[in-house]
Image (tube, rainbow, N blue to C red):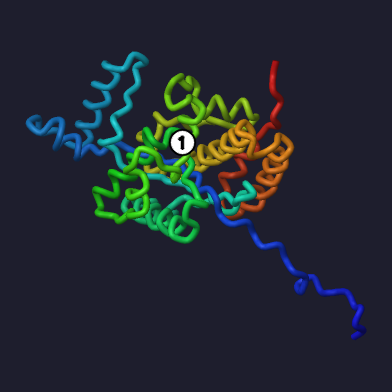
Amino acid sequence: MSSDAPTPEAAKPSVPPARPAYLVFDTESVPDGRLLSLVKYAKDGLSPEQAVERAREEARQLAPNGSDFIPVTFQYPVATCVLRVGADFGLQAITCLDAPQFRPRKIVEQFWAGASHYREKYGSGVQLVTFNGRGFDLPLLELAAFRYGVVAREHFQLTRKRVAGWHLDLMEWMTNFGASRMNGGLDLLSKLLGKPGKLEVRGDQVYAMFLEGKLQDINDYCAFDTLDTYFVLLRTRVLGGELTLEDEHRAVLRAREWLQTQVAHMPALQTYLDNWADWQPWP
């Protein structure tokens, strides 16, 4: 073979992947009827199912909008989906924890083990990212860690201080830490970007789906919310000057191509892609 023969493709040096920089995640939960019965209705002898229905009715009566949302302290996770995002803002992995069984204890153990692993390996170079995570997702997972006795050393050492950079809550970021209200929430921001936002499933349907055994559908819905959160993250980085609008556009195109390669692994992603639209701001 001559010395100037072309280098085989396999021998060409490859560009190393960007280090992980963000763990974007979302959770879905259901009411804990047994805990409600023990704490709120201890003298009434209610079954777990009856306790949930009474708590939902009480919530509807108290809520100005008729919401039957039960406080996070009486819930446990049935879905947690995580997107690993590189320092180049590219998607690297998408995972719904403990698939396909989706057992609450395993979900919690896997989440905190993963969070600790990335924090130990990358230090302050990696962040948790949520939409309303400080108000819901993190308290849910922290209480579940308390329930199961799961170690989350790095998280609690970092967050039990007033100022910490370990977690970026995009709802807080967009509302100036609650100074304004984000009516429409993640769905509104996603649709402004041309992304699917809420489709057929909404959060208030999760409990009924859980009772019907539709754990996979719940986790697919959770994965969609996680993806919407990622695209909101990209736009907030434009607002803060970390990315140009052109950078964001390239990242979005790369994300779409990457998601297409993941459909075989997670078929529900095809639904997300089928409802994708390009960003076309108005008026």
Residue 211 visible? The answer is no
Image spot of residue 57 (x, y percent): 26, 22
- Asked if one can make out residue 33 in the rendered structure from this viewpoint, the answer is yes
Q: Which residue has dot 1 on it?
A: 169
- Who's the residue at 31% across and 45% down the image? 142
Q: Residue at x 51, y 41 (%)?
A: 226
Dividing the picture into quadrants, the one containing residue 245 is: top right
Q: Position of residue 242 (x, y in %)?
A: 63, 39
Q: Is residue 237 above or below residue 5?
A: above
- Under mark 1, the amino acid is Asp
Q: Residue furthest left?
A: 43
Q: Is residue 22 left or right of residue 162?
A: right
> How far across and down, in percent of the image, does residue 41 sit?
13, 30
Left or right: residue 226 versus residue 280 is left
Q: Position of residue 110 (x, y in %)?
A: 39, 56
Nearer to me, 23 or 267: 23
